[in-house]
Amino acid sequence: MAFSLPVILNPLLALLGLGAAIGALLGFVSSRFRIEEDPVVEQINDLLPQTQCGQCSYPGCRPYAEAIAAGDAINKCPPGGEKTIERLANLLNVKVLPLDETHGREEPRKVAFIRESECIGCAKCIPACPVDAILGANKYMHTVISRECTGCDLCIEPCPVDCIDLIPVEDSRQVISPMSEAEYQACINCMLCVPECPVDILPHSLYRACWAGDLETAQQLDLVTCIECGKCDDACPSHIPLTETYQQAMADLSVQWAEKARADLAKRRFELHEKRLARLIAEEEQRRLKRAELASEKRQGAPTNNIQAALERARARRKPK
Amino acid sequence: MTDILLILVGAILVNNFVLTQFLGLCPFMGVSGKVETAIGMSAATVFVLTLASACSYLVFYFLLVPLELEYLRTISFIVVIAAVVSMTEIIMRKTSPLLYRILGIFLPLITSNCAVLGVALLNINQAHSFAESVFFGFGAAAGFSLVLILFSAMREKMDQCDIPAPFKGPAIAMITAGLMSLAFMGFTGMV
C-alpha cells in the first residue's frame, strides 16, 4: 500500500465533519425560516378566465387548475383561448399548444339573457348557475344579473321552454389599424420629444413598447401617466402619431384590466357558491341524522315513554282540583 | 486602525476585484442591467462575502491547520461559501421576499462568484488576521458593489441611446467596462 490508512482517514473525517455540521446548520435554518408558498394550483387558477363553464370537462376552473398541476393538457379552455394558453405555457414552462377544438372554440364574450315574457318560473336554471347570477323564485319570472354572468351556457340546457339566449357583448373600444414596419422605423431616436413631455415620460421608449404590444414595459415607462396632450406629436420630425399609439395601448390595457376584474369577481362568486352548497349539504346531513335519531328512539322505547308521559300529564291536570 | 483603513482602500479602489483583478465578472455583466437589481445584488454580495471570509478563516485556522490539511482549503472553502449562500437565500426569502424576487437566479450565482473564493484564498495567502480578513472581505465586496452600481447606472443611460447595431448589448457593455478599468488603473500605487 502506498499510503497508510490514517493519511486518508484524517481528511475524510474532517470533510465529513464539516459537511455534517453545515448540513445540520442549514437544516435548522430552513426549518426556522420555513415559508408557505403560493401553491402552483392557485397560480394556474388565477390565469384561467373563471367562467366556470366546464367546457374543459372539469366542474369549474379550480378543478381544471388542479388537473393541470397534476399534468393535464393546458389547451382545454375555449373561453380563455390562445392568450390563456400562452400565459399558462409561460408559467409552467411548457410548449404553447393550439386550442383543443373538441372542447369548443374561442368566441367573443357572451352573457345569458332570459326572455322574461316566456319564463315560466320553474327555477331549474338557478341551481345550474356556477356563480349564482340568476335571480328568481318558483312561479316568478327569473332574470340574469348581467354584470355577474360569465356566459358559461350551463343554464341553457336545463330550461324547459328555451327562453335563455346567449348574447355576445359588444366591445365598445374602437380598433385603430396597426402601423406598418416602415412607420415604426421612422423613429430615429432624435429625442426631440423627451424635453417636450410635461409629465416626464420618455415618449420614444414608450412608443417602442406600445408598438411592440409590450404592455408590461409600457406600464413601467409610465403609460398610465400620459395625459395625451400631443406635444410629442408636434415635436416629432417624422410626424409619427405617438399619442394615437399610446391611446391604443391604453385601450388594450384597460381591456386587460377589465378581464382581470371580471375573472376575480367570478372567482369570488364561484367560491361563495361552493361554500353555500357545502353548507346546504351539511345542513341536510344534520337533519337526516336528527330524523334517524328520532326514528330509532321511537322504535326502541318511545311507545311506553309516550304512554308514561300521557299518564303523567293526566295526573298533573287532575291534582290541583 | 491604519492597517484596516489601508486594507479597505486597497480592496475597494486600488486592487478593485472587478476592474483590476478581473474577478466576479459574471454577475458584473449579468446583473448590471438595472440599478435596482444591481443594488440588491450588491447588498447580497456584501453580506455573503463578509460572512464567508470570516467563516473560511475560522475553518482554515481551527479545522484545517490543526489537522495539517491545508491542501484541502479550496474544496472546504467552496463548501463553506455554498453553505453561507444557501443560508442567506433561506433567510432572505423569509425576511425580504421582494429582494428575493429581484435577485432571483443571481443569488445562488454568488456561490460561483469567483471573487468570493478569491477573497477567502487571498486572506490565507496574505496571512491576514481574523479582523483583517473580515475587513478585506467587506472591502472587496464594497468595491464590487461600487463598480457594479456605477456600471448599471451607465448601462441604464446607454439603453436610451442610439447605439450602432453591431455594438448593441454585451459589446458596448464590454467596451464600457474596459474604459472603467482604465480609469481605475489610475489608483495604482496609491497605497
Image (tube, coloured by chain):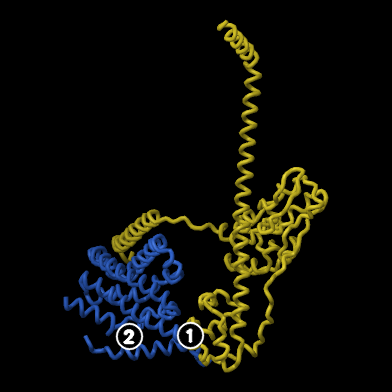
Chain colours: A yellow, B blue
In percent of the image, x 35 and y 65: which residue is there? B84
Compared to A9, does A227 lie above or below?
A: below
Disc 2 packing (10 Å; few <14; some 14–19; many ≥20): some
* Disc 2 element: loop
In percent of the image, x 31 and y 63: which residue is there? A11
**What's the amino acid at mark 2?**
Thr
Q: Hey, which quadrant is residue A243 in on the image?
A: bottom right
Q: Nearer the viewer, mark 1 or mark 2?
A: 1
Q: Hey, which quadrant is residue A107 in on the image?
A: bottom right
Disc 1 packing (10 Å; few <14; some 14–19; many ≥20): few
Among numbered discs 1 and 2, the one appearing first in the sequence: 2
> What's the chain of the residue with tag 2?
B
* Disc 1 element: helix
Q: Label 1 vs label 2: CA separation?
A: 26 Å
Q: Does residue B74 appear in the picture of this structure? A: yes
Q: Does residue B166 appear in the picture of this structure? A: no
x and y percentages locating residue B138 in the rendered image: 28, 73
**What numbered label is drawn on residue B20?**
2
* Residue nearest the observer in this picture, B20 or A256: A256
Report the residue marked by disc 1: B159
* Residue nearest the observer in this picture, A192 or A46: A192
Q: Quadrant of the C terminus of chain A?
A: top right
Q: Image check: B166 left or right of A12?
A: right
